[in-house]
Image: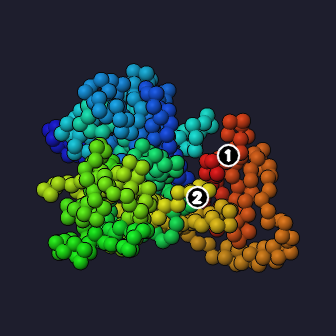
Amino acid sequence: MSASAIKIVALVLLAATPVWPLDCSIPPIYVDIQPRAVHGSDRYMYGTFIGFGTPAQNESLWPSLVYNETSISSMTYCLSGNGSACATGESLGGFFDPSASSSWRPQDQYVSSDPEEQKTNAGVYGMEKAHVYMHQNDADNAVDNTIDMPIRIATSPTSRPGRLGLGPSSPFLSALVSSRRIASRFFSLYVGNGFDRVRGSTTGSLVLGGYDSSRFTGPVYNHTLRPSIPPTVHVSDISIAFTSGNQARISLFDTLQFPDFPSALASGFDAQITTDDYPFSLPYELTQNFITMLNGVPSPSPDGSLALTTDFEGSMVITLSDGFAITLPNSMVYDSKAISPVAARDRNSTAPFTLGLAYLTQVYLMLDYDAGSMHLAKAAPDAPFISLAGACPATVPSANNHQDGGLRGAAMVGGVVGAVIGGLALFALVGWLAFKWWHGKKAPAAAEDKWVDVEGLETRKIQLKGSRLAQMELCDDDEDEGKLRPAKGEFGGRSWYGLRRSGR
């Protein structure tokens, strides 16, 4: 078989949907995204709690929806003509030293599933142990989900290092499923706003094999993924909402305000959702309308964002064709340096239109590669609890509301439906009637939270709606005293896994 034929076969295999038996009882993995110490650097890097090698070298990689392969900076990356990237940080993550890992296995014949890297081939591939940690802080008691997977050690700037490949042919996701660490190639992402461009205080999270039902609110908007391109949506309107002056809200599509606006864009445009860039990259005409309305000019920002030359008080509303709308606050439209979230664009540019990290700071993104679907919802950055729900292909996520301060089980809808045994229905009905009678006899004080000891573990029983009880294990070590580890529970016969959010 020729080398080109081998490459074609390899790519087909990587792109194929996994055929491993589904087990929807496998809990999801919650990976926090926040600044942390990384290997080979004295900087704290904002990214996922993931390490590689034996012993593990923490890398704090940034999730990428565009790339399939996971890429890490070599120890000499910043000595190879990459001075600007290393000077600014640019989410390089940590640096990997294969010579310090006993589990590193070079793969000289490995063929990347990313077309860009097939052309440049600037890096070294190998199989390595990945350590996917489930915890909210850098703590010794983190749950280590270890898998074997291919990684790329980047040696030149031709392809960005410091990234966790989460594209549709991601070897990372496939390895998690094949090793039965997660149930499906379903993952959820909230990027937070603690990265350098925004410098906010809200950390993010990546849920592998499920979603955090407390991290989003309102209805979930469902989309179909398109083959061979990143997640794409249709933008129908972008408006600027003023909080001062006589103007209230003006659309960048408004032909009365902008008489030269082309009719070809009247119905909107397709845009890719990306984590690889921060600003919006809009059609040239819309970019010019934004410049005209808010007095935008080029800025020294390395991501190409426009600066605003006059003070602005207001917000920016982005609406998709299905009605899903999010609002960027004033602090992001006009930040402390007067930089906007919209990038300059050349009239002749053929680059795809994108909704970058600025968009994702307000969105909870859920991707189901096995079912070819995408789900979007408004992010709930300040949710006090983490409520994890596992997901099999075709799961339709639903949000949890914690207005009562309790932890409600997250419903996993659309999973594999088991056989129903008719005889249990009558038993369940009798049990329910008996329970309702017993519950009516209880004093109100019995509904309060209590600390109990179950099988030698100190756990907290939390009263749930409908008088169901959930349990979470309480950490008893000095460093993490009072924090809650994940513990499996049942809610209406469906599995959930709960944590208390860090710092809450």
- Residue type at the position of mark 2: Ala
Q: Residue at x 67, y 40 (%)?
A: 480
The location of residue 246, given as percent across then percent down, is 38, 74
Tell us which disc is closer to us: 1 or 2. 2
Residue furthest out toward the left = 348
Packing grade of label 2 (10 A; few <14, some 14-19, many >=20) is many
Q: On the image, numbered disc 2 is attached to which residue?
A: 383
| Residue 30 visible to an observer of this rendering | yes
In the depicted view, which residue is nearer to us: 177 or 139? 139
Q: Residue at x 71, y 45 (%)?
A: 482
Which amino acid lies under the numbered mark 1 shown in the image of this protein? Answer: Lys
Which residue is rendered at x = 49% and y = 30% of the image?
A: 56
Pointer 1 with pointer 2, Cβ within 8 A? no
Residue 19 shows in this picture? no
Indicate the quadrant where residue 399 lies: bottom right
Q: Earlier in the sequence, mark 1 or mark 2?
A: 2
